[in-house]
Amino acid sequence: MNIVEVNNISKRFDKLQAVDDISFSIEKGKVYGMLGPNGAGKTTTIRMIMNIIIPDSGSVSILGETDYRKISHRIGYLPEERGIYRKMKLNDVLLFLADLKEMKKKTAQVEIDMWLEKLGLAEWKKKKVEELSKGMQQKLQFIATVMPQPELLILDEPFLGLDPINTNLIKDIIMEEKKRGTTIIFSTHQMESAERLCDEIMLINRGKKILSGTVGEVKRQFGKKAIQLDYTGDNSFLNNSPFIADYNDFGNYVEIELLKDAIPHDFLESIVSKVKISRFEVMEPSLHDIFIKSVQGESKIGGKES
């Protein structure tokens, strides 16, 4: 069953075509990554899914409904622009938001206590929101999003402003939600997170869908032509090789993209007498590399970058 069905949605703001004829669907229990540079159209797409913005054309169906009012309590949404009632105490604001999601007060209080403890905010329970750091406020809003156990969880840049420890904590909770059967959409600039968490991804640039599919499918489109090489010696072979299309040199470690028809073994034979090799590994391209190449390619096709 598809939890989300987006069909040919578009949105223009004056002269800006923010979203241009985008379609996708998400099956129940999947983690779907919406990737793209700043201004690509990710947040506008999410806002149309959430019925905050009405598409100029196309349609959106969530949980089998086109009327958002019927299923709003079954959706959890963490917006990119954070906003929570700063003058209220943590416990009070969470009770209020739980009531909006039709949670019973006793049930909500049990969940609040559990989540505050889990995210390290228990001792702040009776403090005002404005007394929290930005990272703590982000965790509070995340609690408000996941606490009602939504069937669809939409997270727009959920790791924004979090330190590595709390980023890992949120990642773990996202995976727990997936195991619970929750369908998850999340937008992020962190390609490593998308690569680890997502079942499927969609890359958007300039309002258009550039590519989509499972992480494995997307990587296979770009082939297994990436080499990770640890070596000592002169790096002149990087500029004089008939096998190399591009490379990123970090000193004694280099990431290499081979030409389309190049054979990794032939490249290895060509350098064994020139440098001392401690590691030679053929790798699938990372989502980071795919992101950069896809977006740069689209920018060249589309003319000058905006």
Image (tube, rainbow, N blue to C red):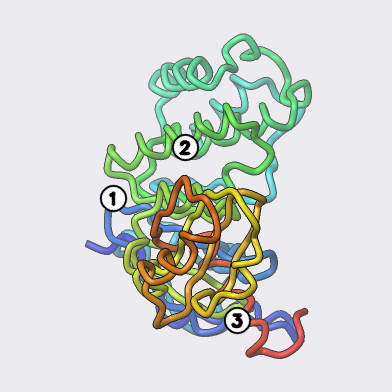
Q: Marks 2/1: CA distance? A: 16 Å
From the image, which quarter does the N terminus lie in? bottom left
The disc placed on residue 29 is 1
Q: Nearer the viewer, residue 84 or 260?
A: 260
Q: Nearer the viewer, residue 34 or 107?
A: 34
Look at the picture and state if 273 lies above or below 239.
Answer: above
Q: Nearer the viewer, residue 49 or 211?
A: 211
Nearest to viewer (mark 3 / mark 2)? 3
Q: Quadrant of residue 247?
A: bottom right
- At 55% from the left edge and 80% from the top edge, which residue is drawn? 208
Give how far across and how far down residue 159 sits, in percent.
Answer: 59, 42
Residue 296 as seen in the image, left or right of residue 196: right
Give how far across and how far down residue 297 sits, in percent.
Answer: 60, 81
Residue 59 as seen in the image, left or right of residue 300: left
Which type of secondary structure does the marked residue at label 1 adopt? loop
From the image, which quarter does the C terminus lie in? bottom right
Would you name the residue on which mark 3 appears? 297
Look at the picture and state if 175 lies above or below 231.
Answer: above
Q: Marks 3/2: CA distance? A: 31 Å
Q: Amino acid at mark 2?
A: Lys
- At 55% from the left edge and 82% from the top edge, which residue is drawn? 10
